[in-house]
Amino acid sequence: MNPFRSILVVDDEPVQRESLAAWLAEDGYDVDRASSGHEAVERARSKPYAVHFVDLKMPPGIDGIETMAEIRKIRPDATIVIVTAYATVETAVAAIKQGAQEYIVKPCNPEEISRLVQRILRMKNLERENLLLRKRLARLYTFHDIVSKNPRMHEIFDLVREVASLRSTVLLEGESGTGKEMIARAIHFAGDRSKKPFVAVSCGALAETLLESELFGHERGSFTGATQRHKGKFELADGGTLLLDEIGDISSKLQVDLLRVLQERSFSRVGGNEELQVDVRIIAATKTELLDAVRAGKFREDLYYRLNVIHVRIPPLRERLEDIPLLTRHFVEHIGLELGKEVKDVSEEALRFLMQQRWPGNVRQLENAIERAIVNSREALLTPEDFAFLIEEANHDSWQAPVGMTLQDVERRMIVATLQQLRGNVKAAAAALGIDRSTLYDKIHKYGIQRASDEPHADASSSEGA
């Protein structure tokens, strides 16, 4: 039995049911029949069908719409065609709203039915091939939940595999949002420490005294408010991995304490005298060049070399533009599922627009932008208009008041720049500029501005004077 060529015909009238089934069988499909909605639901429960033809009126029992709803509870992706002799706009709208792919009227035309099924199966095959391709690409370009096809990132993946089971310290350098913690987790979970704890602490988020207690723990009564013994991150990470994020922010005193732990593999809790031995692999991360801090006298040189045994520089997103489509579709799939939104994909125009952005916040900023677009979108496909807010943010971040320009000059340049970034999409540009589309059309006409899709002879950019 081939589920991709199996069809279920549901109709309480034997003549209608058998004639439709016979037409489909002549085309080479495996056809099952059901004389009621309840029987159809049971058949759908027992096996999958490529297409379900369901009669709208089936007294007594459940009608076609109810049958469709019950089948969808069992097979959420079921393709259902509603068949009826009572064609009205209201029933057609109701059927489509409830999830029917098609709505056909009796008496059925055999050639029309054949074309309809061929079209449905062609679409299902394309969807299946697309899904399989994406899964293959996901396996090919995914490493411990990190998605990339960039050669430099794959060099990092290879390095992670090589050093994962070593005890050597690792220094991760990369801009904010590049995925330093994800690389640290990949190092941990790819090695022989994967069954032991992975513990992360942000060194830049705590004051010196709090960070000292957070790292090394404290004894009861060691300071005001210390009502009981507290285990620090080093103890909690024993046998596993400790990620020290923003290592460049720690104080001079803590630099000395950390150097001692790295040299002797032991420490004492705050307010205690007991020497505690730990087996912890240290991974340090920083968004700044730590060597610059060493040269400036803000970071100990001996600690730097202790940490920098294995060095990994994670490239920013602007240096791996080929990852943007891959990451975008990855985020669309996962965020759409988490939010329960019907957004399924992103248009090629939107992908091109996203690849033109600078992404100062890197992968984290891209993920946040995808989530914002999904939350606000009412369509299944994300378009450039859904990302118009990125233009607003970029303009806000880079804005400098021009000198010697009129207000009209500034307005014209703003419109030109926005249209260029959005490839002439007036609807998206109007949304980014915060004005009505009709207002933007008026201003385009007023200033003689050429959109990206206009013919060269209408080009007004030469009159800008810059």
Image (cartoon, rainbow, N blue to C red):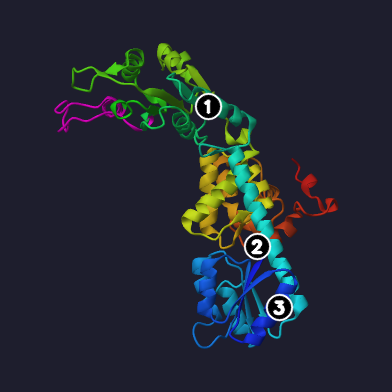
Residue identifier under label 3: 22
Sequence order check, earlier mark of 1 and 3: 3
Q: Quadrant of the C terminus?
A: top right
Rendering quarter of residue 462? top right
Crowding at dot 2, Cα within 10 Å, few <14 / some 14-19 / many 20+, comes out as some
Q: Secondary structure at mark 2?
A: helix
**Disc 1 vs disc 3: Cβ atoms closer than 8 Å?**
no
Indicate whether residue 231 is drawn in magenta. yes
Q: Which residue is situated farthest in the right direction here? A: 457
Q: In the rendered structure, which segment of residues is drawn in magenta?
A: 204-233
Residue identifier under label 1: 161
Please identify, in this view, whether the residue under mark 1 or under mark 3 is nearer the observer: 3
Please identify, in this view, whether the residue under mark 3 or under mark 2 is nearer the observer: 3
The residues tagged by marks 2 and 1 sit, at their Cα atoms, a distance apart of 41 Å
Q: Which kind of residue does numbered mark 2 sit on?
A: Phe
Residue identifier under label 2: 4
Position above or below: 250 against 100: above
The residues tagged by marks 3 and 2 sit, at their Cα atoms, a distance apart of 18 Å
Q: Residue at x 52, y 31 (%)?
A: 175
Q: Which kind of residue does numbered mark 3 sit on?
A: Ala
Q: Is residue 298 left or right of residue 91?
A: left
Q: Position of residue 265 (x, y in %)?
A: 32, 16
